Image: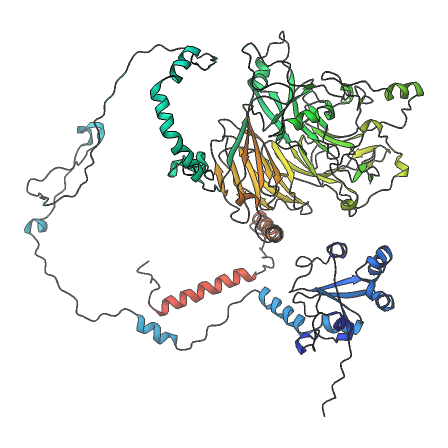
Amino acid sequence: MAPKARKRSKSTAGSKRKGKGRRSQASTPPGGHHDEIFPLVLTSATQELFGCCADEDVTKKSPYKLLKKDDIVQDMKTRAAVSDFSPVKQIVLDYPEEEMLLVFDADFRYGQSFYLVLTPEAKRRILKSPETEASDVFEAEVNKTPRSKHWISLGSEKEIDEELLKETREKLMLKLRVDRIFRLPICFSDHNSADSKDSHLECASYQDSRFNIKKLQTDFGIQAVPKLQSSSTQTLRMVPKDTFTQYEPREFSNEELENILQDESLKNCCAIQTPRILHALQQEEIMNVFIDDWKALGTGLEAGEWSGQVSDSLVLHQIFTNQKYSKDKKISCLNWHPTIYGVIAVALIKKKEEQTEESPLLLPRPAFIVFYSFSDSSNPQLLLECPDDILAFEFSPSNPNIIVGGCVNGQVLLWDISVHVTYLQAAHPGSKKAAANPDTFDLNDNGENKTPVVRFSAVSALETSHKAPITDVQWLPQTFEVTGMGLPVENKMKVSVQITTCSPDCTIRFWDVRLANLLIHTPLDRRQTDQKTPITACSIPETFKHLDRTWKPLFRVSLPKIDTKGEYVPLKFSFEHYTCSTEKDTENKWTENLPEYSQLRMPLTEKLKAMEDVNTKFFVGTESGEIVYTDWKLEIDESGRPRSAKPLLCFNTHQWLVNTAQRSPFFKDIILTTGGWNFAIWKEGVMGGPLVVSQYFEQECTVGCWSLSRPAVFFIGKQDGSVEVWDLLKNSSEPLQLHAHISNTKITCLKPWAVSAKQHFLAVADDLGVLRVFEIPKTLYVPSRHESLSMKKYFELETANLKDYLRRKEIWTKQENEEEELKKMEPGTPVTCPNVTVYPDIKEYHDDVMLEENSLKSIGMWPTGEEI
């Protein structure tokens, strides 16, 4: 006798669900009852906190997530009634086990996107439900390697025999008559090789007069072409010179104007045509004001972009160059201004040829960081004075008015452009400058002393600076800071105050811009600092006066080689930008209350809390093309002195200078590196090598950068002046687009900039000092649906492929070593073969070959020994 069905009690979830009427049986939870679950609404913040983001951490196929009871209780204590688990507070406190089951309800069967299982019995029933077991069995069957089975005949031989080609008619018989000449015996005789030239007798072919073929018809093509003519002339070669011409309008004199206005024919014409024109203006018949005449000028394919077509490739937006500052120089680094639209800064340095040919008697040319604006492409808007050429510089992430730069002589410089921000903002397109009247123009004006020049606020001490040029400089994020031993601690100020630099002198150094606690100002000094003097265009800001000429690094990190003596030579580096969970609440980027660096003081290390979750490991690109993965934390050796740790791994992937090491803006553990003639993509934590390595190109890869809006897109600059656009979702073996001949020389810098959701730019700098800004098309900055998730799966698949390749490589190496040991054994020694493991894939291959051979033999298509 079947047991009676239990009465269904009223559930809490049913009372909260929208709509009326009873629930169908399809809404019953798998393995549970309505009184054992509770529907919940989880906000995005709660989902990220507990790691149960919809369609990412939990999906429709895997909807289960085990939450710790202590975490839920802590969340209810922290957020009280705001917590999403507050309706089930007492049930959670009375729950007997340590983990509770949270289920993602993708179909909203209970009215909400999640529901919480309230009893341990229901949790076990749901986790061991038939759907879960069936899915596990299905996945096991899918992942099972297929194996060949013994072939069983089902009568297909008869069908194959019927398909064979069989002769149905008699063979033709041909009778050939052979001439008597072919039956005559052949007599061979000897020939002296000395009688012939070079001891070689040639049997040349000859024309037989008795045999001739007459062509009845021949097909050939004829094309009419103009007659080729060549001519020349003697011309005088002129030396090109720069010339200047000014035009002015030629106007009628007063007498001529009076004669024209008094002309009777003109008066009659105006009297006749004026009523017609006025009537046409009222009816809007003269012109259509809604048509863009400039775009309407282009007709046909030659109109290009102006014909209203939408381009799928990069479109040139603007070109920046200035002969006064960029002549015989190249651009070593560029950065977009973080807050001001259309302002970009470039560092110009002398070329190597100019440096070698420059006479020591001549005065060195000044070095500048030049600011350009969209409003004026030929004239710079601001100049940052440098003691020597700058190879790398970067804006502060906390204050866009603070800039750090690395000099060729190894010194670190700081600038403060806060006084000139209004001038740069006036350069915004559409704004009006009050500097000069654009309607007036003077021929004798040479344009000098009009661009503001900002002198550096501080420079590091020469004796404690790098001993080689600084090739890369970066600000540490404002979420943490490091001590003198490289230990990460909390940053209570939430301001970026530390800088990292690297140089070919085999060191990576950390710098702090704050004033040390040991330096205590007297009341007289404070009085003097309080009396601020107005800053002119040539004055030096006192923001970092405490660092000028006395600035020393906080600590330095060396890169000792792993297997041999010596050190690696770093050129570029990339560390993980740590972001804490409360950063979204506390961070207010680019606020009006910018930090005053002159008032910041270094806190005592003992009072700061150490941060264990900060990743102190980073990637370094070297001068020889190696990619080194190391740790910046210092170790204590046997003598008690701090020393740099040995690198964890090193791969010689690029074979030449590494010029790019950049992390993806979407995945903090994905790094793009370029150097030599290829590029590579790495994943932090994968110690076996790069996930993606490109083939070796004909042209050297000079620079690379990630897209700011699409996780799958990145740009590569080449030696021949071309730019490649790669899309890993479309093709990982060849670029999506190739923009050749952007420049006549190599590309030195690439930097994207997202102005808004509908406008993205790409800045491209070359070796001639020319800066080009391209507008990125919509297809390259609008991500596809679930592109981030697809790229995440792509990197996971590449990681699995790399691990499988390393496993197979280890097996192959082991087999080769065993074979070499067998060959080295003496001939008299009996050879004992080791235990040979037959791998499934090799056995399956041999079985497939035998099956193919038997099938071909059965149908008579397998070649016999005579045919071979």
Q: Residue at x 52, y 60 (%)?
A: 842
Residue 858: x %, y % from top left: 36, 70
What residue lies at 54% left-to-right and 66% top-to-bottom?
Answer: 146
Q: What colouring does the structure picture have? A: rainbow
**From the viewer's perspective, is 347 left or right of 738?**
right
Q: Which quadrant of the structure image shows residue 673?
A: top right
- Outermost right residue: 523
- Closer-to-camera residue (272/474): 272
231 relative position to 61: left or right: left
Q: Position of residue 25 (x, y in %)?
A: 67, 78
Quadrant of the rendering where the C terminus is positioned:
bottom left
Res 664 seen here:
yes
Depicted 826 relative to depicted 295: above or below: below
Q: Measured along the vertical axis of the image, is residue 531 above or below residue 810?
A: above
Quarter assignment of residue 340: top right
Depicted 798 relative to depicted 227: above or below: below
Front-lying residue, 168 or 356? 356
Q: Position of residue 411 (x, y in %)?
A: 73, 22
Q: Is residue 286 visible in the rendered structure shown here?
A: no
Vertical arrangement, residue 158 with respect to residue 598, above or below: below
Q: Residue at x 58, y 55 (%)?
A: 830
**Could you say which is closer to the camera, residue 611 or residue 292?**
292
Q: Residue extending furthest bottom?
A: 1
- Give the number of callouts: 0
In the image, is 689 to the left or to the right of 544? left
Residue 779 place in picture, x, y as percent: 53, 45
Q: Quadrant of the N terminus?
A: bottom right
